[in-house]
Amino acid sequence: MDLKYIQQIAAKQNLSLKQINSVHQLQSEGATIPFMARYRKEATGNLDEVAIGNVMEQIKYFEELDKTQHSVGPGEPKALAALEMLDGLLGELLEEYEHDGLGKRLVTCIVADHGFERVDKTFKPNAVLRAAGPNDEENGAYGVITPIKRR
């Protein structure tokens, strides 16, 4: 994986390059999220399952969808296959959350820095979460999404 992508993931997730490289290496060797979180703490710097899943999601994004759409164009069969593969991985990640009892406590939002389609309607999850207040369990809000400031 290109160093520029590893650096972007590290900055976005507020992690070290070593942590990103370790997750990437373990993933390429076939390690699962629970295995990494439980048995490779020394390699990942004690990342939990959610953090490892987030890193893996970013790795797949940079390795597959973005690169593919830029090389062949959106809507092309190869780009759609990459998108379908990512959708499957997201499904696996959500199943892991459910399996570990996190499914009812997490809200998963998929966002992008740019797109290949026109967007006519926007949703601002921060506005909803901030209106509910932090950790407002009665209304189902468990935090606020905080954008990372670019350097």
Image: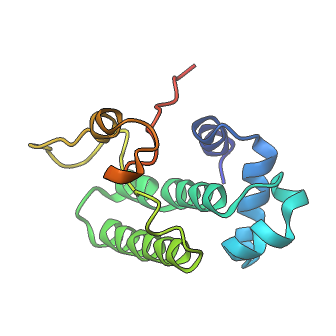
Q: Is residue 102 visible?
A: yes
**Residue 6 on image: x %, y %:** 66, 45
Q: Quadrant of residue 38?
A: bottom right
Residue 110 visible (yes or no): no
| Residue drawn at the location 55% of the way across and 76% of the way down | 96
**Residue reaching furthest to the front:** 138
Please say if 2 is above or below 86: above
Q: Is residue 47 left or right of residue 1?
A: right
State whether residue 79 is above or below residue 67.
Answer: below
Where, quadrant-wise, is the N terminus in this rendering?
Answer: bottom right
Q: Residue 40, how many percent across, how many down?
A: 85, 67
In the rendered image, the residue lying farthest to the right is 42
Q: How many marks?
A: 0
- Work out whether 130 lies above or below 52: above
Figure quadrant of residue 48:
bottom right
Q: Tell me the residue at 43%/67% (across/down).
A: 104
- 44 over 101 or under it: above or below: above
Where residue 102 sits: x, y (%)? 53, 67
